[in-house]
Image (spheres, rainbow, N blue to C red):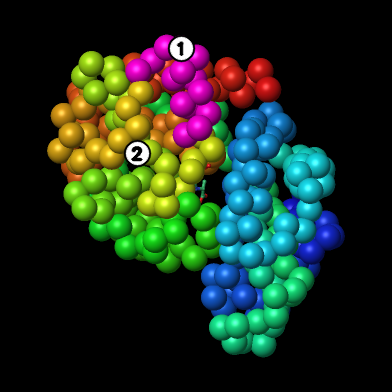
Amino acid sequence: MTRIVFLNGEFVPYEQAKIPIMDRGFLFGDGIYEVTAVLGGRLLDNIPHLARLERSLKEIAIANPYSDAEWTRLQTELVRRNALADGLVYIEVTRGVFERDFVCPDDLTPTVVMFTQPKDLRDPPAARDGVAVITVPELRWKRRDIKSVSLLAQVLAKMAARHAGVAEAWMIEDDHVTEGASSTSFIVTKDRRIVTRPLSTAVLPGITRAAVLKLVERHALRLDERPFTVPEALRAAEAFLTSASSLVTPVVKIDGEPVGDGTPGPLTRELRQLYLKMAEAG
Ligand code: PDD
């Protein structure tokens, strides 16, 4: 089957989707993105993803080219055209195309790209066995709340993780974990308190994080929104990460040291199941 992508208002075969080399996304990382999970052909938590897209665009002064209803229609059509069951829809909006110069007119036409990626989100090995992470210094800029495509620091962190044979890198600033290179970090203390960093410009406001916090409230679990250190994580009962591309995934090792008994924790497994159930219910 031909892979169909979306480029500037049109659904086209992947091979035909070309972007000028003067695109500011390519030259400056001047753009933002979103990733929405697709389960059983349905977009998961898409309204909050589109709200974050709107916010990211506003923060870097790019006009949102579509309404939420239009985005949803286009995403749904792309999912349909690619017969995607489980996977991801990726959206990128850049400031547009202009002769290379740091400054450009305020009213460039943004470049809009969307594509799908099949992925086993329901029952991948990482969800069953848990993943190991390494820690790396936090090298990103100071507006990590914007879902910017300037991802060099995260690429370097993920490559370091891959070279260490692990799945994710937790970034450390002032001795505390900010978040994963592409995920939100959580621990569960021995007295079953769920701990994650509060929202600020230091981290991306994860949509899966928000969904998990809703579950925490609904099931009367205890939550502490505060930064935590790696020694604290290593003393914790459980650790996990969340993202659209991994949902809720146990973290069983940090820098080679086991978290808890080194296997996926019961509360983490329960939260993953609750999240999947909530997703199925729509
Ligand atoms: N990344 N923190 C960072 C730095 C991220 O890049 C992501 C997501 C998250 C989790 O956010 P959400 O739950 O909304 O997916 C946290 C996406 C999946 C990516 O870059 O592919």
Residue 15 visible somewhere in the drawing? no
Start-end of magenta stretch? 209-222
Q: Is residue 122 left or right of residue 94?
A: left
Looking at the picture, does residue 219 appear above or below residue 200? above
Amino acid type, residue under disc 2 in the picture: Arg
Which residue appears farthest toward the right when viewing the image? Answer: 10
Q: Is residue 75 left or right of residue 137?
A: right
272 inside magenta stretch: no
Point 49% across, 65% down: residue: 150
Q: Is residue 99 left or right of residue 206?
A: right
User: What x and y, as percent, mark residue 188?
Assistant: 29, 25
- Number of numbered callouts drawn: 2
Tag of residue 37: none
Predominant SS along the magenta part? helix
Helix, strand or loop for disc 1: loop
Q: Nearer the viewer, residue 129 or 199?
A: 199
Q: Is residue 174 left or right of residue 3?
A: left
Helix, strand or loop for disc 2: loop
Point 63% across, 33% down: residue: 45
Point 46% across, 26% down: residue: 213
User: What x and y, as percent, mark residue 192?
Assistant: 28, 17
Circle 1 residue: 219
Tag of residue 197: 2
Looking at the picture, does residue 100 appear above or below residue 230? below
